Image: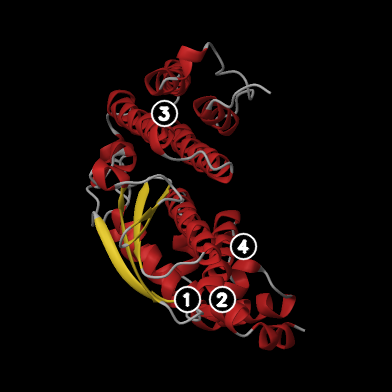
């Protein structure tokens, strides 16, 4: 069996998300170094934008193409990380290479926007250079306490892997004298307390899902998917039902509520694939948290808040919007995990 090259996996996912053939970015082994992968991705995106600009495309058309490419990059990285994490290889040098590739592409995208779209910042919509840039993370670490279903008290400390001194790191699965160290994606997690194998597995899965939700929110927010839903001013149960499209009754209730506050039927654009996928991911993470603790919505809310605050794609405004959406959806979804029998009766 040929050896898996994580950077090739990344290149293939990016190619597909940018509308290229799966193997179109393939090459020799040396061609999958972070700088080489970033160079090919940026070359394709930049070449396409330059071609369209030379053909007479205006700034609005170029911005749309740029937005689509940026979203494709985000989705490609998300899928590649998920594949590699599922295979148990997303850690150490592999995670560092993926992060380095992402950083190089983001820097290149920012430069590209400034070079090819000089008037973007004067438009009514946000400038592309601002959209492509990275913010300073709102936090570098976060800590929280969890009581497991077995009654054990855990203290969990999460930081970017690079923020930990290498001497304090151990391999995934290793144990330190005062607890355990876990690396999930780009996070280094220290756990103090009695964590059995089943709880450890649930925690690792949950942390990976939280990272995936951050990627999903960023991609969806970039496309404006969540603004339309939040404008409906629905309560958590109504928004969750609308997002998951549980029953026709739920959709009718949403339309009736929207009609009372806006005088018209809820626009179909408010229920979009980005919102539905995000709600689905949130529900799956909530179920994973439920395996670990009897207060899954509280744990997931804290992890999302801490994780998104460490994500340098999130400025304070985006973080506030994310938590508003998370609070609403978690309020509506928690009954499906904490009281599934009651939800089954209600949905009939």
Q: Nearer the viewer, mark 4 or mark 3?
A: 4
Mark 3 to mark 1: distance in Å?
46 Å
Whole-percent x, y for residue 332 in the image: 54, 78
Residue 258 at least partly seen? no
Q: Nearer the viewer, mark 4 or mark 2?
A: 2
Residue in the picture at 55% in, 41% down: 79
First in residue order: circle 3 vs circle 1: 3
Mark 4 to mark 1: distance in Å?
28 Å
Q: Say what secondary structure mark 2 lies in.
A: helix
Residue in the picture at 46% in, 76% down: 148
Q: Which mark is residue 297?
A: 1
Q: Are marks 1 and 2 in contact (CB under 8 Å)?
A: yes
| Camera-nearest residue between 124 and 308 | 308
Q: Say what secondary structure mark 4 lies in.
A: helix
Q: Are marks 4 and 2 in contact (CB under 8 Å)?
A: no
Mark 1 to mark 2: distance in Å?
9 Å
Residue 308 lies, with reference to residue 324, above or below; the image says above
Residue 205 lies, with reference to residue 327, above or below; the image says above
Q: Are marks 4 and 3 in contact (CB under 8 Å)?
A: no
**What is the quadrant of the N terminus in the image?**
top right
Mark 4 to mark 2: distance in Å?
21 Å
Q: Which mark is residue 333?
A: 2
Left or right: where does residue 332 sit relative to residue 166? right
Residue at numbered disc 4: 268
Mark 4 to mark 3: distance in Å?
29 Å
Residue at numbered disc 3: 58
Q: How many marks?
A: 4
Whole-percent x, y for residue 257 in the image: 56, 82
């Amino acid at each position: 069996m040929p050896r898996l090259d994580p950077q090739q996996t990344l290149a293939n996912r990016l190619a597909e998300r940018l509308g290229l053939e799966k193997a179109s970015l393939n090459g020799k082994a040396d061609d999958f170094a972070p700088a080489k992968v970033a160079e090919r991705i940026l070359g394709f995106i930049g070449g396409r934008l330059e071609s369209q600009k030379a053909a007479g495309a205006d700034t609005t058309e170029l911005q749309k193409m740029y937005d689509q490419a940026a979203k494709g990059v985000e989705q490609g990285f998300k899928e590649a990380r998920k594949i590699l994490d599922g295979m148990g290889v997303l850690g150490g040098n592999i995670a560092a290479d993926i992060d380095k590739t992402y950083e190089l592409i983001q820097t290149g995208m920012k430069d590209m926007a400034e070079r090819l779209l000089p008037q973007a910042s004067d438009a009514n919509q946000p400038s592309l250079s601002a959209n492509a840039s990275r913010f300073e993370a709102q936090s570098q670490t976060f800590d929280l306490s969890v009581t497991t279903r077995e009654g054990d008290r855990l203290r969990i400390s999460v930081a970017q892997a690079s923020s930990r001194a290498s001497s304090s790191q151990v391999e995934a699965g290793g144990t330190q004298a005062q607890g355990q160290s876990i690396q999930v994606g780009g996070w280094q997690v220290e756990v103090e307390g009695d964590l059995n194998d089943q709880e450890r597995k649930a925690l690792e899965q949950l942390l990976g899902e939280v990272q995936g939700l951050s990627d999903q929110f960023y991609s969806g927010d970039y496309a404006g998917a969540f603004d339309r839903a939040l404008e409906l001013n629905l309560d958590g149960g109504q928004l969750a039902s609308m997002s998951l499209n549980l029953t026709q009754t739920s959709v009718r209730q949403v339309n009736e509520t929207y009609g009372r506050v806006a005088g018209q039927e809820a626009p179909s654009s408010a229920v979009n694939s980005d919102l539905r996928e995000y709600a689905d991911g949130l529900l799956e993470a909530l179920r994973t948290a439920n395996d670990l603790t009897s207060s899954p919505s509280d744990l997931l809310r804290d992890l999302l808040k801490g994780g998104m605050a460490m994500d340098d794609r999130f400025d304070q405004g985006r973080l506030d919007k994310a938590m508003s959406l998370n609070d609403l959806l978690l309020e509506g979804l928690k009954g499906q995990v904490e009281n599934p029998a009651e939800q089954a009766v209600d949905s009939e």
